[in-house]
Each structure stands twice: as C-alpha cells, then as structure tokens.
Amino acid sequence: MTKTYLKVSFQEKERPKALGALWDPIQKKWYVPAGLELAAFQQWLDPGVGIPVSTDLATLAGNSSIALSASPAKGISLSELLGGISKTISRTYRQAIWIILEVVQVKVHSGHVYPEVSERDATGRLTA
C-alpha cells in the first residue's frame, strides 16, 4: 500500500483528517492513502512531491459509471469538468465559507453579467 506522508501540525490535523488522511502510529505522521487525489492535500505535501494529473476522466468527473467513448486526447465536456471541480471543492470545504475578494469591473453583455474579481496583497495592491 502506497502512503504519501504529510507535514501537518497538531493544530491543523482536523482538516487533512476530514479530507481522508490517516494517522500512521509507527511513523507518527499523517498520510494520504492510495487512491486519494493528492491535490486536496497540497499545502501539507513536501515541496519535492509532485501532484500527478489524473488520466482517469471518470474519476475526474467524480462518477465511475460515466461511459466515455471519446479518446482521452479529445478531452471531456465542460459540464463533466465543472462537476469534478464542484465535488472536489465540496470535499475540501465541508462547511460554508466566505470568500474575500474585490470586484474590479463588471461587464454586461446580452443580459449576462461578467464580474472581474481580484484580491489585495499585504501591501494593498491588487493581485491578478
């Protein structure tokens, strides 16, 4: 069984635990068990650990029953991608969160509203 160990302080142990990390009592470290995507644990990974990109499109979409007839080179639909992103966010942030941002500009076209958002860094400058 492959284990990817994490650098987790005692104070923050509940977040990786909620994402599926397990405790190794021998190593006295939290780890990501085989089969879980590492992307959700990125902040606790050693800098040298790369996050592999999933080539399993059904896993990316969060539904192993999806039948994909297109070759992987052609990609997946936008709705499948957004569904996978939505499920990943839901697993990462199990409770409602507030996002702090600044609306830089709002464009209206054909009845659709397109906000451009950003945030400010520690010096007060807008970031990309």
Image (cartoon, helix red, strand yellow):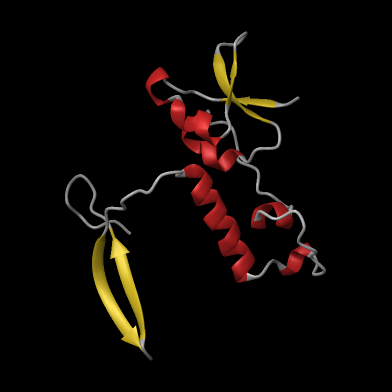
Observer-nearest of 67 and 94: 94
Q: Position of residue 88 (x, y in %)?
A: 55, 49
Q: Residue at x 70, y 37 (%)?
A: 35
Residue 45 versus residue 9 in the image, above or below: below
Task: Report whether 51 appears left or right of 128.
Answer: right
Observer-nearest of 112 and 119: 112
Res 45 seen here: no
In the picture as drawn, the residue positioned furthest to the bottom comes out as: 110
Q: Quadrant of residue 22?
A: top right
In the picture as drawn, the residue positioned furthest to the front comes out as: 95
Quadrant of the image for the C terminus? Answer: bottom left
In the picture as drawn, the residue positioned furthest to the left comes out as: 124
Residue 12 versus residue 110 in the image, above or below: above
Task: Report whether 81 appears left or right of 94.
Answer: right
Q: Position of residue 94 (x, y in %)?
A: 46, 43
Q: Residue at x 54, y 25 (%)?
A: 6
Q: Residue at x 49, y 50 (%)?
A: 89
Quadrant of the image for the N terminus? Answer: top right
Res 128 seen here: yes
Observer-nearest of 66 and 7: 66
Q: Residue at x 73, y 69 (%)?
A: 74
Q: Position of residue 18 (x, y in %)?
A: 51, 33
Q: Quadrant of residue 114?
A: bottom left
Q: Position of residue 42 (x, y in %)?
A: 51, 37
Count of marks overlaid on the render: 0
